[in-house]
């Protein structure tokens, strides 16, 4: 019996050492960013006079990844592709979701029909409903990649990239990550304009399927118009690609700095909240309350509107030009968890938001 106990202790020791080392590694790399160079392989993306979107975005994506890896030992960089191969759109999203990534950066180049004079400049997109037909056109062009995939209609639940009706799904959508996505988009766009001296075509919203599928803050950068002679010359030059990667990196670095500051405050805040909870005060301590956000829209809707799918009474609060619709109101977050499960059957992206003195804080 004795030798086997010894063996057991030895085994336990080995196990503990292993556990200790792996948890240390997990701790030292606590932020994951996924870089998604668009297109690849049989899908060249947009075509310029002498270059292809797939080559430009891969080069910029790899440069960006190196910058992050070299400067942030605590960040894990993953690529949806790091060579010239075809990757299905839902596969790109699943790489990010499986890794529980903290950020998703999709990189593309724009193009305009040859019959029109091409504009030039950079734009950074976040997921949402297009506010103009231009934005819808960009989303249509990028979403058309799924037509390279077999069974795309089944895989993407009947989504047809060319039909405007398909884009209605983007209208009634709770986007938990919109605030953070807009923050990153603004930082990156600002750097592309000031550091890389690109023409500013602003931060915009449109219905990109790839962003729809990822469960984290995400942006889609259009580095420039490959159909414009000046932009193309810049995009295909090595110095242009380096500068673009640097600018996206600078935006990322600022975002990460803010994120680190907030997560420090957040973990401290959590600690004090749980001690208040143990004192048995579930009521709205300090004016705190929780609601279930079901979706956001730029339309003002009345209670009982068909868009709410029978859920009510519904409240709303304003955020910029958006109405954010919520259901339920309580000081005890646990009371909402069962409700959330029910609401999610109708609005799968619903989530709990926190208010303090009538203002949303989380
Ligand atoms: Zn593209």
Image (cartoon, helix red, strand yellow):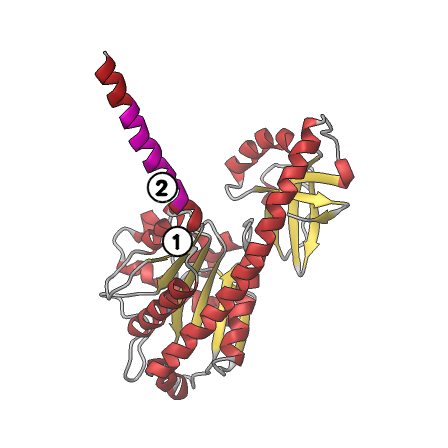
Q: What secondary structure prevails in the magenta region?
A: helix
Q: Quadrant of residue 69?
A: bottom left
User: Is residue 194 within the magenta segment?
Assistant: no
Q: CA distance from mark 1 to mark 2?
A: 42 Å
Give the position of the N terminus as an image quadrant. Answer: top left
Q: Position of residue 264 (x, y in %)?
A: 59, 50
Where's residue 35, x and y in %? 38, 61
Q: Which residues are magenta?
A: 9-24
Residue 336's x, y, as percent?
A: 62, 32
The answer to if 11 sits in the magenta stretch is yes
Can the viewer see residue 308?
yes
Q: Which residue is mark 1?
A: 159
Residue in view at x 43 percent, y 86 percent: 117
Instruction: Name the element at disc 2.
Output: helix
Q: Nearer the viewer, residue 328 or 161?
A: 328
- Residue 324 located left or right of residue 101: right
Rendered position, 265 above or below 321: above
Residue beneath the point at 41% across and 73% down: 245
Which residue lies at the image location 33% right of the left edge and 81% below the top edge? Answer: 238
Pointer 2 residue Cβ closer than 8 Å to ligand 1: no
Query: In front here: 259 or 86?
Result: 259
Q: Which residue is mark 2?
A: 22
The front one of 69 and 124 is 69
Instruction: Indicate which disc, 1 or 2, sits on the residue closer to the N terminus.
Output: 2
- Category of crowding for the residue at label 1, using alpha-carbon neighbours closer than 10 angstroms: few (below 14), some (14–19), many (at least 20): some
């Amino acid at each position: 019996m004795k030798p086997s106990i010894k063996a057991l202790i030895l085994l336990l020791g080995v196990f503990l050492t292993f556990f200790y080392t792996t948890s240390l590694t997990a701790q030292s790399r606590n932020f994951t960013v996924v870089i998604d160079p668009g297109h690849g392989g049989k899908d060249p993306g947009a075509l310029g006079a002498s270059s292809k979107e797939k080559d430009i975005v891969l080069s910029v994506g790899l440069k960006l990844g190196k910058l992050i890896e070299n400067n942030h030992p605590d960040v894990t960089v993953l690529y949806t592709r790091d060579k010239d191969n075809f990757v299905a759109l839902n596969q790109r999203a699943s790489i990010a979701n499986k890794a529980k990534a903290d950020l998703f950066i999709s990189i593309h180049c724009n193009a305009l029909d040859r019959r029109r004079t091409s504009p030039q400049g950079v734009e950074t997109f976040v997921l949402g409903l297009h506010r103009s037909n231009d934005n819808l056109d960009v989303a249509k062009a990028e979403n058309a990649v799924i037509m390279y995939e077999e069974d795309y209609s089944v895989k993407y639940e009947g989504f047809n990239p060319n039909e405007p009706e398909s884009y209605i799904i983007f209208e009634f959508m709770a986007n938990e990550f919109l605030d953070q996505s807009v923050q990153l988009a603004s930082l990156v766009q600002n750097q592309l304009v000031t550091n890389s001296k690109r023409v500013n075509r602003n931060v915009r919203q449109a219905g990109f399927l790839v962003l729809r599928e990822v469960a984290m803050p995400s942006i889609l950068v259009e580095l420039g118009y490959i159909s414009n002679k000046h932009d193309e010359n810049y995009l295909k030059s090595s110095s242009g690609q380096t500068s673009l990667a640097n600018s996206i990196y600078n935006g990322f670095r600022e975002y990460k700095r803010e994120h680190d500051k907030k997560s420090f405050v957040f973990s401290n805040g959590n600690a004090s909240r749980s001690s208040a909870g143990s004192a048995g005060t579930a009521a709205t301590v300090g004016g705190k309350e929780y609601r279930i956000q079901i979706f956001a829209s730029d339309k003002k809707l009345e209670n009982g509107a068909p868009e709410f799918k029978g859920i009510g009474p519904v409240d709303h609060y304003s955020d910029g030009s958006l109405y954010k619709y919520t259901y339920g109101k309580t000081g005890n977050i646990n009371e909402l968890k069962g409700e959330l499960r029910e609401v999610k059957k109708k609005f799968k992206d619903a989530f709990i938001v926190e208010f303090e003195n009538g203002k949303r804080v989380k």
